[in-house]
Image (cartoon, helix red, strand yellow):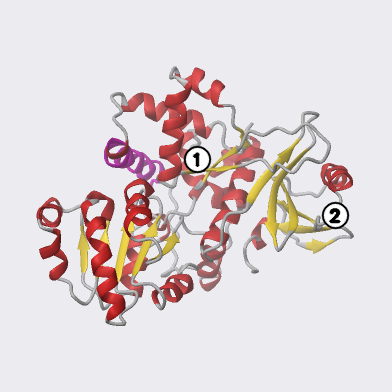
Amino acid sequence: MNLKLYRPSIARHAEPLLRSLARSFPVLVITGPRQSGKTTLAREVFSDLPYVNLEDPDVREQAILDPRLFFRRFPDGVVLDEVQRAPVLMSYMLGVADEAVRAGRFGRYVLTGSHQFGIMDGVTQSLAGRVGLVQLLPLSHAELRVAEEATAYEISLEQRIFEGGYPALHGPARPEQLPHWFSAYMATYLERDVRQMLNVGDLLLFQRFVCMCASRSGQTLNLNSLATDCGVSQPTARQWLTVLQASGLVALVGAFHRNFGKRLVKAPKLYFLDTGLLCHLLRLSDPSVLWAHALRGAIFETWVASEVLKHRANRGLPADLYHWRDNHGLEVDLVAEQDGHLVPVECKSGMTVQSDWFAPYRKWRSIAGANIDDLVLVYGGDVSYRGGDHHVLSWRDLGLSS
């Protein structure tokens, strides 16, 4: 499919958070999946700092062989890209950070990384209390809407889901064919990140595992079933799932455990964090295929959950997102905690609001009792409005208000 539209430079909603943290911490860490825009954001916000890419083997060798000399080259700060490629640097950052604090220089050492294992280990062991953390996920719907409004372009729900939010797919150099870009993305991810984090002998088997996870996005995770279908052990499936989480491809949304007098399903739900990649893994060839796809509802729920997670990450807030289901099938798609209250969220991909969409929420509210806010129903239609005990929110308006 040929998608020629591109947006002007898109402002990232995480930028105010990054600038705020830069006034309080000597070291900043930007994590997130590959191609989520970490480097672009860091170089735009800290354009006065020198930039070093540790993917460059020559630069990486210099940094690993003599870290002290390496840091001496940048006494006034530096942006270090893909810092997990030289984890030894994290051990030397403590002295650098403390010296920066003594000199009253904050926000001068900016580290980016595509997976959290190498970075977060170094942060927790060496830099606790000295680091401001930002998780940058792919572009949100709200970020894209601002750019689209500047060009008076109107996008469909199916196209929004099919394109996803990777910045490379929304700029002047966007590829003509999205499937080719996603195929290259997965190949890079497997060869670089997976080989770094895991000793996987059979990358084809791991790729099959990723596709099996895609078929379960928006659903309660059954780890035994997933492992069996992939032909691996349950511990292996659990380890591989952890890698997908650490590299920012998926998120697990835990079950809300408050006991309302019911036997609860305690397994988490699995969500991909970019629906463009999800559609590619599901082998969808065109946005129009989503109209009648068997997984349309789960894909739409995945999109809503990922937008909620992006919204909170861009503000430096904890996810605080759950799901709720009892063993009789009563279910609330998403439950967000906010100021001591529970905000239930239902996700419906249909364009026409149906009265029976509200029944599960009302049953749940009668069980849950106090501190339950009105339902937020996100649906595939175009009109948002307020009802008696609910807010009906068009997908177009998701994330556009605080």
Identify the residue shown where x is 31% and y is 41%.
193
Instruction: Name the quadrant containing residue 51.
Output: bottom left
Q: Spatial distance from mark 2 to mark 1, Cα to Cα?
A: 37 Å
| Secondary structure of the residue carrying numbered label 1 | helix
- Callout 1: few (<14), some (14-19), or many (20+) C-alpha neighbours within 10 Å? many
Q: Where is residue 277? Give x, y as percent.
A: 46, 43
Q: Is residue 193 magenta?
A: yes
Q: Where is residue 311? Give x, y as percent.
A: 57, 61
Q: Earlier in the sequence, mark 2 or mark 1?
A: 1
Amino acid type for the residue under numbered disc 2: Ala
Name the residue that disc number 2 marks: 370
- Indicate left or right for 45 with 352 as reference: left
- Which residue is situated farthest in the bottom direction here? 104
Identify the residue shown where x is 74% and y is 33%.
264
Q: Quarter of the image for the N terminus: give it.
A: top left
| Secondary structure of the residue carrying numbered label 2 | loop
Identify the residue shown where x is 46% and y is 34%.
241
Q: How many numbered circles does the render carry? A: 2
Identify the residue shown where x is 48% and y is 59%.
139
- Indicate left or right for 240 with 295 as reference: left
Q: Which residues are magenta?
A: 175-195
Q: Nearer the viewer, mark 2 or mark 1?
A: 2
* Majority secondary structure in the magenta region: helix
Q: Where is residue 375? Give x, y as percent.
A: 79, 54
Q: Which mark is residue 45?
A: none
Amino acid type for the residue under numbered disc 1: Leu
Q: Nearer the viewer, residue 248 or 216?
A: 248
Name the residue that disc number 1 marks: 278
